[in-house]
Image (cartoon, grey):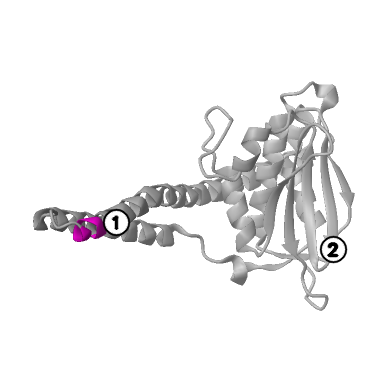
Amino acid sequence: MLVQQRVARRRAEELLRLGQVGRLNAMGELAAGMAHELNQPLTAILANTRAAVRLLDDEPPATDSARAAMEAASVQARRAADVLARLRRSVERPGSAERRQPVALRAAAEAALHLLEPRLRAAGVRPRIEGEARRPVLADPVALEQILHNLLSNALHALQRVPAGERRLTLRLEAHAGRASLSVIDSGPGIPAPDRPRVFEPFFTTRAGGLGLGLSLCETLAASMDGRLELLEPPGRGAAFRLTLPQAPADAPGP
């Protein structure tokens, strides 16, 4: 009994820590997404005002005051874009290159499943781990943990929308040509075809009350580790996401 309480307390502490890291990263992703979203119309304003200035230059009827107004708008639009660019740089997470270290992909998957074990048990889901990636990957352990937690949480949310007897969750490990991958495959209702191209867009979500930043953040974290996160075509019903990371050199110290 005492051991179970200790395990439950450690799991709760880990989930709390992971949630705090996730919220901080989500705040950064939110600011970066806002900068991205606002920078596009500002760039269009800048391009249009410059075009207007050129058109006015080509037409003698244009007045100096109109030209001056367009120039002023162009200057202000450029200044706003510069401010947003500085904001985005200020909230970008530091590069993960310095924090990357050899990590056993299977052990990371097992640790993520352990944290979610109460939710898995409550949903009647018994996950399977298939395949093997014997060489460790080069990854930022915290970023990898966050990606796996997000993918598994999304899969669990999807599985709760199908009957209990149809709930399947598979984690598939593969290695090829110096890279290793971990795929999270669920038997949930899947992602509608029109939504598939947008799953990694900031603020895009089909979940009520969702911010739409989870997968966008995970894709950013994967790229910061020289990796890739992609949505696959599932073999049947459901969704499948694959995280691919570079393997550690053969002579690298073990995890």
> Could you say where residue 222 lies in the image, as x and y percent from the top left?
64, 57
Q: Is residue 194 left or right of residue 28?
A: right
Mark 1 vs mark 2: in front: 1
Label 2 amino acid?
His
Mark 2 element type: strand
Based on the displayed image, in which of its 4 quarters is residue 108 positioned?
Answer: bottom right
Q: Closest to the observer: 59 or 115?
A: 59
> Could you say where residue 190 lies in the image, as x and y percent from the top left?
73, 32
Alpha-carbon neighbours of circle 1 within 10 Å: few (<14), some, or many (≥20)? few
Label 1 amino acid?
Ala
Q: Is residue 197 above or below residue 166?
A: below
Q: Is residue 203 left or right of residue 252?
A: left
Based on the displayed image, in which of its 4 quarters is residue 248 positioned?
Answer: bottom right
Mark 1 element type: helix
Q: Which mark is first along the chain, 2 or 1?
A: 1
Look at 38% across and 52% down and name the residue there: 39
Q: Is residue 234 above or below residue 107?
A: above
Look at 63% across and 42% down and name the residue there: 197
Look at 76% across and 64% down and name the residue there: 137
Q: Quadrant of the C terminus?
A: bottom right
Any magenta on residue 251? no
Determine if residue 16 is in view.
no
Alpha-carbon neighbours of circle 2 within 10 Å: few (<14), some, or many (≥20)? few
Q: Which residue is mark 1?
A: 51
Furthest residue toward bottom: 251
Determine if residue 123 is in view.
yes
> Could you say where residue 233 lies in the image, as x and y percent from the top left?
77, 42
Q: Is residue 102 above or below residue 208?
A: below
Q: Which residue is mark 2?
A: 176
Query: CA–CA distance between discs 1 and 2?
Result: 51 Å
Q: Quadrant of the N terminus?
A: top right
What range is drawn magenta here? 54-58
